[in-house]
Structure formats: C-alpha cells, structure tokens
C-alpha cells in the first residue's frame, strides 16, 4: 500500500475515519469542508494513517483541523537547530487556547481539561499575557 501522501483518496478515507471515530465516541460526525479537505490532501502525512486519525479525533472534539509541522520546519536558533523552547511554548499556548475554548472561558474547567492545577493555569496565562 502506498504512503498516505501518495494516495488520491484522502477525502474518502478521512470521511470514513471520521464516521468511525464519531461512532466510537458516541458523537455525530463533523462534516469536513472543502478547504479542510484541501489542507488534508496537501499535507505530507509523515505519521501516515495514524496521524490522520489523530487529526480527525482532535477535529471531532474541537472543530479545528490542526496539522503538525513537518520535520525541519518551524523556528530555528542561530545555529540552525530547531528551537525546542519555541515549539513547546507554541504547542502549550495552542493547548491552553483549545482548553479555554472548550471550557467556554471557565478557567477552572480549562485547568481540569488540561490536567493541571488552577494555579498552574493562571501562571501560564499570566506568562503569555492572557487572562
């Protein structure tokens, strides 16, 4: 079987995986819009079908298609190495923003979703300039 990035049926596969994930979670499948399907088709899929399943699971919960950066992209330090701190900070702020959206702004609920204490969430929000 060819790698996912070489297949022309990502839209069909994504729709079927969405139905499977939604059924397993007891939720209604979310429809994928044409622009979202284009993004899925254009992605390099280094994680192959498992990565697609993960992206669709997050989409089912959050309503957003969030694709990981391919290796070698992202911010680089002066020596050309990937700046791990920058990537981790970006990932953390994405996770916090997602939790705050899902909790409808309720910081206590967002902290529970993230699995951190309220105090830790407040520190994260203070350090990022959000409140």
Image (cartoon, rainbow, N blue to C red):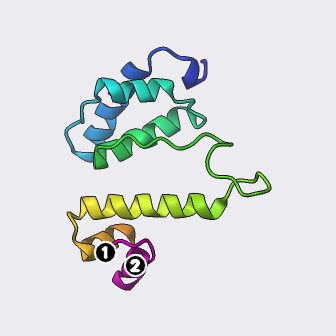
**Residue 111 visible from this viewpoint:** yes
At 51% from the left and 38% from the top, the residue drawn is 50
Q: Earlier in the sequence, mark 1 or mark 2?
A: 2
User: For this view, does 72 lie left or right of residue 49?
Assistant: right
Q: Quadrant of residue 63?
A: top left
Horizontal and vertical percent position of residue 95? 41, 60
Q: Main secondary structure of the magenta part?
A: helix
- Residue 131 is tagged as 1
Question: Can you say which quadrant of the picture contains the N terminus?
Answer: top right
Q: Quadrant of residue 98?
A: bottom left
Measured along the vertical axis of the image, is residue 46 above or below residue 114?
above
Q: Nearer the viewer, residue 116 or 27?
A: 116
- Residue 61 is tagged as none
Q: Nearer the viewer, residue 67 or 113?
A: 67
Horizontal and vertical percent position of residue 71? 66, 42
At 61% from the left and 48% from the top, the residue drawn is 74
Does the CB distance between marks 1 and 2 fall below 8 Å? Answer: yes
Horizontal and vertical percent position of residue 115? 39, 72
**Residue 13 visible from this viewpoint:** no
Badge 2 density bin: few <14, some 14–19, many ≥20, Cα 10 Å: few
At 34% from the left and 82% from the top, the residue drawn is 118
Q: Nearer the viewer, residue 23 or 107?
A: 107
Badge 1 density bin: few <14, some 14–19, many ≥20, Cα 10 Å: few
Residue that label 2 marks:
126
Question: Can you say which quadrant of the picture contains the C terminus?
Answer: bottom left
Magenta-highlighted residues? 116-131
What secondary structure is marked by label 1? loop
User: For this view, does 52 lie left or right of residue 100?
Assistant: right
């Amino acid at each position: 079987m060819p790698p996912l990035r070489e297949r022309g049926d990502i839209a069909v596969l994504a729709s079927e995986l969405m139905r499977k994930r939604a059924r397993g979670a007891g939720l209604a499948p979310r429809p994928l819009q044409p622009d979202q399907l284009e993004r899925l088709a254009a992605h390099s899929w280094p994680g192959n079908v498992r990565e697609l399943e993960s992206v669709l699971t997050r989409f089912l919960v959050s309503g957003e298609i969030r694709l990981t950066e391919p290796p070698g992209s992202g911010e680089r330090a002066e020596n050309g190495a990937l700046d791990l701190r920058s990537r981790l900070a970006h990932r953390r702020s994405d996770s916090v923003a997602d939790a705050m959206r899902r909790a409808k702004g309720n910081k206590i609920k967002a902290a529970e979703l993230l699995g951190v204490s309220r105090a830790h969430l407040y520190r994260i929000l203070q350090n990022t300039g959000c409140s």
